[in-house]
Image (cartoon, grey):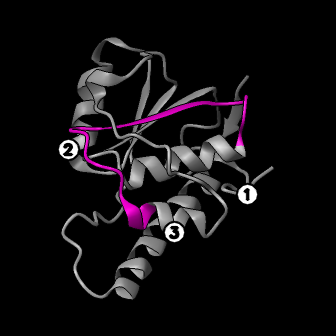
Amino acid sequence: MSIQTSAADGGRSGKKNVGAILFACNINAVRSAMAEAMVKVTFPKEIFVDSCGVAPGNPDGFAIAVMAEIGIDMGAHQPKSFDDLDSEFYDVIISFSPEAHAAAVELTQSMDCETLYWPVDNLAELTGSREERLRAYRHVRDDIQSKLENYLNKPVAVKT
């Protein structure tokens, strides 16, 4: 199965069908993990989705907490790297960091796969109170959700 996306470039390239998406960031604990979880909940059995990082990190408690606020359990997510992927068949790789985008471009040199770069705040060096940090994580979650809704033409992160 696949779904029809809107043009990621503002309509210049037209719509395309997407059946498999890989999300990538630096450590696969926040941005790409959030995006994977949102798409899995929104498009069960419609889109194959996975995520990875340039170098895998550790599960992030703040990311897990803000996703739980919208009804998505990320507690079982285990960060992995590009080398740990089970598939090499993706219609699109969406990267949230320059480092991940460079790795995606390298991976797709011999693949028919679109690569997109969506800049999203990196929270790796975030400091502040618990509430300030949660606010920053919510902003990242909401930014990713908005980008996905625009690209996939459907509200995402809504349990079906």
State yes or no: residue 85 in magenta: no
Image check: 113 left or right of 129? right
Mark 2–mark 1 Cα distance, whole angstroms, equals: 30 Å
Question: Which of the labelled discs sits on residue 99, or is there none?
Answer: 2
- Residue under the point 42% across and 78% down: 134
Magenta residues? 43-63
- Residue under the point 48% across and 31% down: 92
Question: Which of the labelled discs sits on residue 66, or is there none?
Answer: 3
* 41, above or below 15, in the image: below
Mark 3–mark 2 Cα distance, whole angstroms, equals: 25 Å
Image check: 158 left or right of 134? right
**Which quadrant does the N terminus fall into?**
top right
Q: Which three-letter amino acid code belongs to the residue tagged 1?
A: Val
Question: Which of the labelled discs sits on residue 158, or is there none?
Answer: 1
Residue 3 in percent (x, y) is at 71, 33
Q: Which three-letter amino acid code belongs to the residue tagged 2?
A: Glu
Circle 2 — which element? Answer: helix
